[in-house]
Structures are given as C-alpha cells and as structure tokens.
C-alpha cells in the first residue's frame, strides 16, 4: 500500500481524527505516538510539516472543546486569515507520519459573511397574505433562529405604503417596531435582533437610549440599533409629528446618534449633549446596556449627505433592497471619501446589505419559483418582468450561485446580507425559501 498521504472518503472503525473549531492556536508540536494509515488513496491534499514553521505557513487551530463541536459531522478548523478560509476540514495521519488536510463539502466557506432575515410583519407579508399577528411573526422568527440565521431585523412604520415599491395604494398594518422586537427578545436566545431602521423623528433620542438599554438587557446583549432620517411624510404629518426638509432631518439624525453615543457608551455616568435639535444634561441611563461600549449604531440609506452622517456618527452602514455590485462600489467610494474628510479610517465603518432574495434548488426550480413569486406579488408588480433582469441587483440563484454572490459581497466588505424573500420588504412568499436557505446555504457559511 502506498505511503503517500490519503484522503478520508468515509469513516471506519479506528480512524484517527485531529480536528478543531477555533481561530488562532499553534501548530501541533509533534505527531501522536501512534501513526496509522487511515483511508484510501487520494489526491490534492494539503500537507503540514510538524515541528517547524516555513514562510507562508498557515496554522491549524488546536482542538476545540467538546461543547463547541457541531451536533453532527466533523468539527471545523480555521486556516489562516483569508476571507474564504472557513472549510470543513479533517486531519489524518498517513503511514509516512505526515499530517494531511482534507476538505469536505462543496468548496471554501465564507469567513465573515452572515445571513440575516427581514422578519415578515406586515399584513401583506405572509404566503397567504393574511393579517399579521404576533403568533405568526414569532413562528418565523423562531424558525429562522433554528435554521441558523444570524440576525432578525424588523422595520419601524405605522403602516406599510406599497406605492413606494410600485404596489397598490392600500396601507398594510403592522405591530409597533420596538414592542415587537422586545417580545422577540423573550422568544429567542441566540439570534441577534435589530431595527432596519427606526425613524429618528418618531421618538426622542434620550427616550430611545433608555429603550435600547432595556431591550439589550432583555436580549442579553443581542441588540443592533438601526436609525434613519425617515421618508414617509404621511406617517409624520397624520400622527402629528414634524416632518422638516431633508437637510434638517439628516441633521436631526446626526444629533440623535450623538445623544445615543453619549448616553449609552458610559451609561451609568451622567452624560450631556447640546445640539440644535436635542439636548440632555447630566442624564444617566440606569441600568445600562449589556454590550460594551454599547449596542452598535447603524444608519440606513445611500444619499451623499446621509453617507456623510454615517462617516461622522455611525458604527455601520446599511442599504436596501436592490443593489448591483457596481452601484455599491460607487456608493462605497462616496462613503470612503466622507470618512477621509471626517478623519476616520473607512474600514472602521461596518457594512450590511438588504436584498430581495429568491433561491431555487436548480435552474429549472428557480424558474418555477420565480413564476410563483410573480403570481404572489400584489398589484402585478412583477408582471412582464424577466427573471434575469430582476436578479441582476438582488440575491437570486441556485445555492451555488447565491454563495458565489455572497462571496462577491464579502469581498466588498459586507459582513451581513439581510434577506427579504419577496419583492417587498419584510415579506416571505413561501415557507420553502427559509427551508432552502437553511438546508443548502447557511450550512456552507
């Protein structure tokens, strides 16, 4: 039998595995005392020499503790710091006492990319398009958490106006954003929770700071706070709220972020903020949030002036629901220029992206699901639209195609794509979309 390193094609009694799930760690100092030939012959194996470091070596992590191993299948190990470095890896010892590394699955895993879900919570949001109730909303939130989505996002509106998306004029109801998110915090345990995004003019920022600290306590440190300037004028005027010109709303957004930073960063200590629109004087937030220095502050939008606010005042930037990589690069250039003017390294600004999403098992299945999506969409919004045209600026394809697109977004610095499985925001046209993501996409992230 050949002594060259061999791959593991199946697990047999007596196989010796050295595996881990960690980042960092050291090379194994020496091989185990017993070297054993474990598997059938193979090709294309990565080899690591023991006991020496060479330029360009990638270090394998030490074995993970048992409670960090996945429920089934081999554990994972991290190699190097490449953006595409997460893979399903198994170490085997060959008869020649060399350490061989085999990769399972369908190729490299994404190191940092995560998927979030735009939780359906409007009357039009569900497959049967029946009114939103909390029981229906929480069912999808719990399902998403069980499938491995990293974050749940809800929007902040008194109602949904579909005319913005080319739909009918009838307003769609929804539970209130913060009440809903607080309830979801009590029904979930792992998944992060966020607002995408809250209108700064709906609530005084000092009150919002107290709300955020309380919800972060309820969620054990799982809150992301997304803010925007607000855009739907009737929501403001019909509810007796001022709706100033865009420049003033953006200035209010920047000041609101300043208040939140001041009150939440050292919450127990009295903090002050003096601005044109908002003022606080020696105001503590007790108890403060769990997260340190505070929950992340995101801003949503893509205009030039808004990107200036992001550069000066936010932790992260989000844009939704349709975006090509070319358009994103152009907007990213504007953000980077704004960061330079603000004296801030552009890499400090975190990036997330919301996209309408459609997944099919294969090309034929994708076309069939597209037809079902067209039939589901209210107001004939997708009538006459070609799949290839709609897909160009969205997350659409077979699982392999979706993963390729996610890799492209990760290369642009996007850490999370928020999926709305519909041409509408915060909607799901069929339950199988979540199941396909959970079965064929999320395990490969």
Image: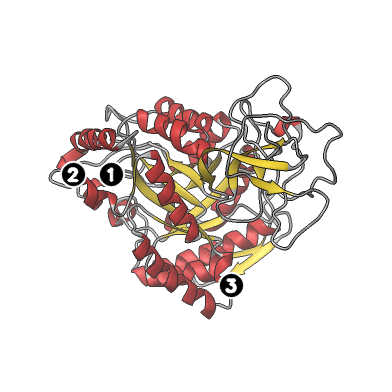
Question: Does the CB distance between marks 3 and 2 fall below 8 Å?
Answer: no
Q: Is residue 318 visible?
A: yes
Does any portion of residue 278 appear in the rendered image? Answer: no
Q: Secondary structure at mark 3?
A: loop
Tag shown at residue 423? 1
Q: Of all residues shown, which one is farthest toward the bottom?
A: 341
Kindly identify which numbered label has been placed on residue 382: 2
Numbered mark located on residue 415 in the image: none
10 Å crowding of disc 3: few (<14), some (14-19), many (20+) = some
Query: Closer to the camera, 104 or 158?
Result: 104
Quadrant housing residue 15: top right
- Residue 209 in the image: x percent, y percent? 58, 53
**Disc 2 on helix, strand or loop?**
loop
Give the left or right position of residue 347, taking residue 167 as reference: right
Which residue is painted at 56% across and 50% down in the image? 112
User: How many dots with numbers?
Assistant: 3
Residue at horizontal 44%, vertical 56%? 408
Q: As drawn, which residue projects farthest toward the top?
A: 13
Q: Are marks 1 and 2 in contact (CB under 8 Å)?
A: yes
Left or right of 6 on screen, residue 227: left
Q: How is the image coloured?
A: secondary structure
The numbered mark at residue 345 is 3
Residue 388 placement (x, y as % from top left): 23, 49
76 w.r.t. 13: above or below: below
As helix, strand or loop, the secondary structure at mark 1 comes to loop
CA–CA distance in space, label 3 to label 2: 41 Å
């Amino acid at each position: 039998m050949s002594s060259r390193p061999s791959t593991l094609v199946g697990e047999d009694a007596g196989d010796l595995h050295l595996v881990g799930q960690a980042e960092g760690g050291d090379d194994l100092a020496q091989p185990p005392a017993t070297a054993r030939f474990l598997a059938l012959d193979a090709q294309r194996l990565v080899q690591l020499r023991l006991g020496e470091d060479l330029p360009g070596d990638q270090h394998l992590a030490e074995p993970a503790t048992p409670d960090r191993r996945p429920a089934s299948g081999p554990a994972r190990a991290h190699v190097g710091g490449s953006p595409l470095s997460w893979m399903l890896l198994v170490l085997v010892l060959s008869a020649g006492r060399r350490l061989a590394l085999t990769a399972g699955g369908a190729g490299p895993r994404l190191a940092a990319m995560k998927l979030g879900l735009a939780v359906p919570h409007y009357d039009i949001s569900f497959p049967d398009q029946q009114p939103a109730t909390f029981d229906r909303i929480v069912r999808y939130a719990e399902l998403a958490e069980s499938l491995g989505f990293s974050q749940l996002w809800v929007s902040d509106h008194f109602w949904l106006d579909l005319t913005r998306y080319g739909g009918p004029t009838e307003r769609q109801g929804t539970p209130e954003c913060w009440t809903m998110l607080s309830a979801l915090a009590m029904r979930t345990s792992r998944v992060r929770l966020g607002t995408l995004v809250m209108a700064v003019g709906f609530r005084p920022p000092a009150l919002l700071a107290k709300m955020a600290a309380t919800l972060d306590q309820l969620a054990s440190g799982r809150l992301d706070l997304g803010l925007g300037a607000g855009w739907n004028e009737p929501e403001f005027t019909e509810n007796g709220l001022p709706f100033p010109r865009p420049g003033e709303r953006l200035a209010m957004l920047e000041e609101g972020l300043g208040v939140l930073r001041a009150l939440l960063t050292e919450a127990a200590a009295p903090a002050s903020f003096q601005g044109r629109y908002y003022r606080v004087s020696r105001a503590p937030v007790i108890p403060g949030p769990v997260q340190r220095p505070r929950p992340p502050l995101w801003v949503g939008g893509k205009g030039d002036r808004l990107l200036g606010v992001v550069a000066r005042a936010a932790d992260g930037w989000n844009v939704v629901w349709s975006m090509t990589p070319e358009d994103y690069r152009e907007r990213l250039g504007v953000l980077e220029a704004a960061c330079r003017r603000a004296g801030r390294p552009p890499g400090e600004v975190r990036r997330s992206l919301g996209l309408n999403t459609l997944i099919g098992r294969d090309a034929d299945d994708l076309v069939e699901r597209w037809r079902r999506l067209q039939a589901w969409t209210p107001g004939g919004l997708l009538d006459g639209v070609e799949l290839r045209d709609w897909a160009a600026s969205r997350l659409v394809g077979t699982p392999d195609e979706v993963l390729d697109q996610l890799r492209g977004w990760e290369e642009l610095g996007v850490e999370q794509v928020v999926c709305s499985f519909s041409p509408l925001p915060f909607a799901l046209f069929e339950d199988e979309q979540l199941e396909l993501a959970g079965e064929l996409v999320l395990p490969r992230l």
